[in-house]
Image (cartoon, coloured by chain):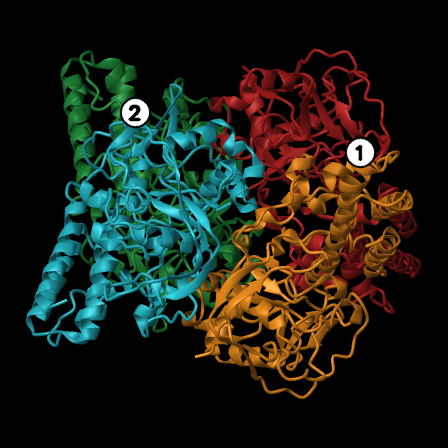
Chain colours: A green, B cyan, C orange, D red
């Protein structure tokens, strides 16, 4: 990507972050609602720290750091660049204030523009900037999911933005799409950006399989709930059943039962559960139990990628402004799975591990992905909180099997015969 | 107290709260740093809720509540007036914003002035307003101690206000003051305000005792530390030793060791420990262990009260602006214990229980004190964060034996003979 | 006490311990059912270790220790005599086996008899032996209460011994006995044995009070339960209400509701709750809440002692074999409280602290009592698991306010107008 | 297998269990040392319960159950056959006594012999008996590892059996064996017994790889320790580093440092660490970190199985009596990996999931494996505590990544070029 193009894209990515926090107060941005989530202010500073630490300090001659303490406060997990403030303590930082963090963003953005103007960038630098932008897009999604969690803990159930028409649509029949399997290739291909965990492209052997035309909907999931799904241990993985009992799960995250109807907390406040929209805020355990209840299974990540590789990367992404999964409006042409991008991240049956031949990038950014490769499961496809140009068929998202605060759902699969 | 006098005092107490938060950001006021502490914003709202709920709603005819949800959000522990938001969740409330809470304060203050102007108040109402003002003063102290705890958890150790000269003073020799004991009366006496836990005045029998002329100083406490005080189980109550080990205590709260010297976090930022100032941020366990190490003991609350009853209520209170215990400047006349009011709350050996014949006030305000009468120890005398007109010789403060975030220290006692 | 008399009493105390474990298996004696309880085998060894460590090793010239590792394994909390095995780990000791521990007991008993035969003992030694015997009696009670807890965690609810007729008796009306108060003396008096925490005898001032003729019965307590006692926060101390909610208390420990009736686990297996027997297995919090519900209060320990000082030390002790509180068969003469000794330990409103002028014994046995003087409440009078000659009016038992596995109940008190 | 042959094998498997507990006391068999481990008595009863519940009750006409309560007490996790006693409570069962459990075993064994004598068994029954015998063999290994853990928590470090000569042997050079990869088949093949998790046999695609000729030895691992392996976060998976810090790991489980030398707890008591024996009692995290430190990686389970499929199932199994990994005595012929069976289970990089096309067995025994397929990693090859005829190349053992109490080690792998 030429420097001017990259400069424009940088400005756009950074501005998109700014748009997300319009209307938020300093308090909304400061509080940490659980150890897994971070304050919005921290996301704003950490994404900026990434550019300052990995791009500006080594490469912009006259760069003057904004504040020497920020390196400690806003490092997330890069052990190689020094000590860091513990994650569960991020919510203790009333200082620096939001205004100071926003000044930090401007300071770094101005320096980045100086860097872009300084002439063509070496390939390694340009790649780091690319990585930083995708990093920022990941945190854009977390800004929304973490903020949603915070607001949900307020008994007033306040909205992030005004109500959005969540119009119910007629349900579609679920069908199946067949794939032949055999020796297939997965992993990133081509010249565009990818994270190191999508590489190397490699061969896998797949038996013939089928994958559902649509994600599981809230209406489908209500049937599971009403059939006693949360009370039947035989439907669950053992660790999943333990989680159900220890946490008292009786429905997806954010659901509340009032007057015989299910309602859910959204970024627009409380709203009725839309039965035709993709099911959401499910843990891996719930997705897996649902599939067993339905007599089907989750796809592996290789199956999912084969099914998605020819589909256009279109759908309900963050740019739509819905910030919630939506019912399908039109069914795609035969052979293309519907809603495979956007709406909800889809849990796969694959644990998040290294591809054969995987090598982390050298240096500190090598800590980006590889060290998280245990105890998590892969999700694919992006969600209603993902930037549209951030995701692709080979993209591997990952969360622990009990995580429910992301926009996470599922699509069923089965063996072909 | 005539209504105009009470009205003026009301205005002054409320304004004093406002002065405490000058210079604080919305974030400083929103975060909860531990379950024992509350956000400043919560203190601002809760003290206001007290007047709205117990004074205005029952007694001001045309009173219109500010927001119907606040009754739930800002009730502390009065079960009799309905459900309440759980204490450890107070830090989850990014909404209402600080600005809204300040508007709530103004709304209630205006209504209170209308009430004062409405004519002479019935005695019961005037008494409730008095209680509300003392309640607010208690929370003024907590605003400072809770905020101090929050700022201490920020690795930048930010200051609440600019540095204050903590001038070292020459040490004074500690002496003893003798008391005869026998049948003595303790508890509140006279017409002024008191909390119900100071009543009824009643007789106790005391053996002859002596009480120290000065509180234990930081210099004294450093000797304890350097003599291995935190490593010698024989000096500690069993529960205290458990706390030392479980929490890794090696010095009073907020102390840090750097370059062979002790420094401590104050509301003015990090500062050297002043050896001549009263020792501070000690738990009951540490106070009790220090006394054993010194070959002395803590006074009972009855002994303390007998020793203090003729002393003037003067000293280093919040109005001095020091916000930290100070070294003694001049020794009082013979027979009067120095620094018995202000600087630090002094732990006694008495558990916080009901006086013989104690009756809680009827109605919801009866939950003010009585229900906390287990598992806590009595402290006396007020601190550098206490309003000067809030404390008296019969005043009983109380905290669990492991609490260290208050300005808490000790004064030694011994049996006579 | 002359040496032959002490020798005989030693033999009897030790034999009484042996009788308690008749019929128990090695497994019954090895398991620790919660951190507060100890395995029976540990009690057997620890009481023996006391004699070996404090009596034999310093005083019997040719004494050869049974096993050098036992000093570490069976020290309870005497820091002064070296390291000790952590309390919650006592249940990890499958070795030494029960048989070895019984051999240890015989080894020490034989050495003790040699010591008794060696001539008149110095007073200090005789006093230590006395202390050791009372120490063993305390552990006899704990053998029963700890074993009861273990058996209660077995879903088969096995019995310790065969059923015992728990005959219901007609209820007695509760009355009151008046006491004048004034300057009274409490604490141990006379030449008999006492623990150091009963000293020094000292004066207290009491207002006139009344104390109930009988302990609160199970029938009384069922009324509290049925009146919603466990669901009404206004009846509870704040810490007590926290315990009710955190632990889901709905009735006294060991109670189970079946077929609309209350049953309870006893050392004879499951049995119906006897409405006329003293209420049992109550925490301090439950006792205090019951008293508030009844419109009365708990006595202080001084009141209790004044009320009990002239009563004969008679009642349902361990020797009766009932091992459960029993309904009263005959009412004592006027002015004497019924069942004030035996049946159930009675919670008082007094926290367990040092008497004025209290001095722990010098040396390691000084750790016996003093270091536990925080966070616990005093119980008086002994129970159905206490040896008859172990208790007296000045005896101070103590447990944390949430402990329920002892035979603990209450007697009401009130102010005499 | 003909019935007489199966009958003989049944008798032998059951007798092997009996031999394991020779010399253990009732206490050794009763105590549960952590929630992950079970008391030996529970293993003895649970394996018997399996035969009673799944074989005798449905198939032996006149079978009379031994005790109706055992179905509840000794069910492990089969939800389909009713409620069960919670796993962490297994150590609370002092009753039934060991003697009763042994009588239960005899009762079931006699009934089983009647069943064998009743004529040829239907294939389904014979298969269930086969499953029960392999189930019992799994528990034989757990008897040893759980007992080892219990004994290790006794400060006396008692031995399970007398010392065994752990003779140091000269070290061997580690080499590599090459495999071509491509489309390979893994999973169980042929007519012998296997668990359902080894099926179906299926194709995978492997890139060319190399696998080490020997397992990593204790000597290798000491180098890792001495190179600061436990203090360098860059060597660890993020979850592994969390475990290192939270648990204070500084060496493999059971290691103790004394006099500058490493010693380890074995079933023969404390012994020096044998540098030439395979490294043992490692978690997955430690195995994975070691591999990274060494510049290599763990094999996948498919790679391991391809490497092992032609090796004879020979090695240091439980029958050798060593009960500890041993140094290699003779190197196998070229191309065959040494010690690939026995000594230590070898961690693979594969999470434990379902094979493509996996179907759990119908009915309650379908809960045997499938429900544990999350959050665990696969180990291969058997250990010094595994019965020799219990393991095979396709056998999949699995444990959570932080488990260290099994005899678990590793073998390195790398990509070919």
Q: Position of residue A44 (x, y in %)?
A: 24, 35
Q: Give how far apart the Cα atoms at labels 1 and 2 are.
A: 56 Å
Task: Find disc 1 in the rendering and name its residue.
Answer: C68
Residue C343, compared with residue D165, is above or below; it is below
On the rendered structure, is D269 left or right of B70?
Answer: right
On the rendered structure, is C353 left or right of B410?
Answer: right
Give whichever of C274, A218 is nearer the camera. C274
Residue ID at (63%, 44%): C367
Foreground mark, 1 or 2, reads: 1
Task: Find disc 2 in the rendering and name its residue.
Answer: A71
Q: Position of residue A142 (x, y in %)?
A: 31, 41
Give whichever of A245, A139 is nearer the camera. A245
Give whichever of D247, B205 is nearer the camera. B205
Which chain hosts label 2? A
Q: Quadrant of the C terminus of chain D?
A: top right
Which chain hosts label 1? C
């Amino acid at each position: 990507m030429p420097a001017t193009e990259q400069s424009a894209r940088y400005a756009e990515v950074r501005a998109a972050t700014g748009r997300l926090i319009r209307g938020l107060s300093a308090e909304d941005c400061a509080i940490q609602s659980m150890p897994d989530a971070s304050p919005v202010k921290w996301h704003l500073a950490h994404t900026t720290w990434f550019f300052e630490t990995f791009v500006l300090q080594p490469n912009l001659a006259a760069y003057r750091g904004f504040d020497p303490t920020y390196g400690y406060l806003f490092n997330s997990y890069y052990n190689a660049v020094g000590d860091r403030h513990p994650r569960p303590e991020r919510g203790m930082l009333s200082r620096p204030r939001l205004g100071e963090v926003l000044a930090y963003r401007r300071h770094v953005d101005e320096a980045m523009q100086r860097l872009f103007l300084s002439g063509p960038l070496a390939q390694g630098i340009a790649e780091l900037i690319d990585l930083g932008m995708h990093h920022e897009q990941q945190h854009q999604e977390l800004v929304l999911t973490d903020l949603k969690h915070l607001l949900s803990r307020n008994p007033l159930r306040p909205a992030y933005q005004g109500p959005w028409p969540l119009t119910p649509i007629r349900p579609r029949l679920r069908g199946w799409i067949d794939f032949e399997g055999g020796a297939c290739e997965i992993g990133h291909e081509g010249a565009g950006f990818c994270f190191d965990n999508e590489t190397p492209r490699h061969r896998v052997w797949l038996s013939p399989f089928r994958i559902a035309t649509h994600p599981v909907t809230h209406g489908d999931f209500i049937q599971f709930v009403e059939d006693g799904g949360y009370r039947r241990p035989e439907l669950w993985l053992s660790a999943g059943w333990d989680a159900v009992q220890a946490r008292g799960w009786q429905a997806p995250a954010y659901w509340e039962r009032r007057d015989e109807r299910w309602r859910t907390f959204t970024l627009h406040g409380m709203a009725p559960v839309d039965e035709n929209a993709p099911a959401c805020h499910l843990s891996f355990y719930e997705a897996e139990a649902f599939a067993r209840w339905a007599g089907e299974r989750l796809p592996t990540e290789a199956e999912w990628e084969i099914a998605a590789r020819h589909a256009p990367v279109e759908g309900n992404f963050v740019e739509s402004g819905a910030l919630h999964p939506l019912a399908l409006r039109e069914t795609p042409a035969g052979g293309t799975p519907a809603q495979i991008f956007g709406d909800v991240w889809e849990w796969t049956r694959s644990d998040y591990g290294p591809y054969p031949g995987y090598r982390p990038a050298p240096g500190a950014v090598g800590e980006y992905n590889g060290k998280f490769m245990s105890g998590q499961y892969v999700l694919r496809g992006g969600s209603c909180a993902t930037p549209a140009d951030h995701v692709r068929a080979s993209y591997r998202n990952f969360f622990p099997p009990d995580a429910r605060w992301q926009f996470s759902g599922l699509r069923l699969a089965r063996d072909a015969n």
